[in-house]
Image: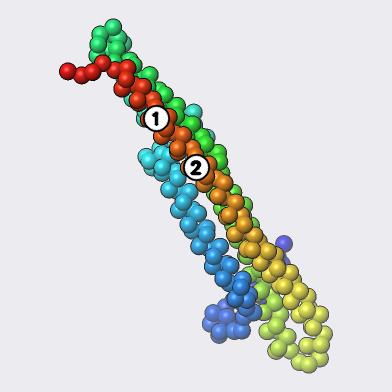
Amino acid sequence: MDTLKKIVSRGRQRAEEIVMNAEKTELGADVEQLLAKADKTEKHMKKLLSAIEAYLQPNPNIRVLDPRKDKSSRQNNIDHLGEAMKETATALGSDTQYGGALLRTAQTEAQLGAAERQLVQTVTTQTMAGIRHILDVDLKNIQKERALLSKKRLDLDATKSSWKRATPAAQSAAEPQLLAAKAEFDKQLDIVRTLLEALQPALDAQLKHLLELVEAQAKYYAACQQHLADLKRDLPAGR
């Protein structure tokens, strides 16, 4: 846990950097570029996740009011349409031409609803889970270690500033503290660099989940087309 002395020291160092343009230890161009890429990745992966959620559930009110992760068991609009057709067929008489057609169509709507739920389940448990892992694990770890790196950098620069202002005798006595701060900073910098370099392979691994999304869509639309073709064949021709 950070001591009060360290917290005050970091605050003073940050203020001097802002107000007095005090010298800062650079992270290195490679790390800065990787950090910028991580920020861009986080921004766009969040947008992608939001777009997939909107694709699966276009109604934003339902998305907000129903936070369950597994929505595959919830009835969808197609299910409600099928139930309305079934109730109407029963009320008007399923033995009539119109009632019979409504009942047969209701069966297809139930099949379409089931196909949509299967699509939602596949995309939720595979594609969206993969994106959430990037956001909640990979990028969250990067941000956590990045925040710690910022603290170590402030500690190092605060120690440097104190060392430069000290007398030669005091500098000699404080040199071990300066070396220790530099070692902690370098260690944390290596941790952050390692996490950042691992981000691209983690993103490349998402290709599997993208292919699962495409496959789920292909199966869904093929099933819908087949169910509707069967329905069209079974319905009496209109006059």
Q: Whole-Å distance between the Cαs marked 2 and 1?
A: 16 Å
Q: Position of residue 197 (x, y in %)?
A: 64, 63
Looking at the rendered structure, the kind of residue marked 1 is Cys
The part of the image, by quadrant, that contains residue 126 is top right
The image's mark for residue 213 is 2
Kind of element beneath mark 2: helix
Q: Position of residue 236 (x, y in %)?
A: 26, 16
The part of the image, by quadrant, that contains residue 55 is top left
Report the label total: 2
Q: Earlier in the sequence, mark 2 or mark 1?
A: 2
The image's mark for residue 206 is none
From the viewer's perspective, tell me whether residue 44 is left or right of residue 99: right
Report the residue at 70% width, 83% height from top: 160
Q: Position of residue 16 (x, y in %)?
A: 58, 81
Write down the residue under mark 1. Answer: 224
Report the residue at 50% width, 62% height from top: 40
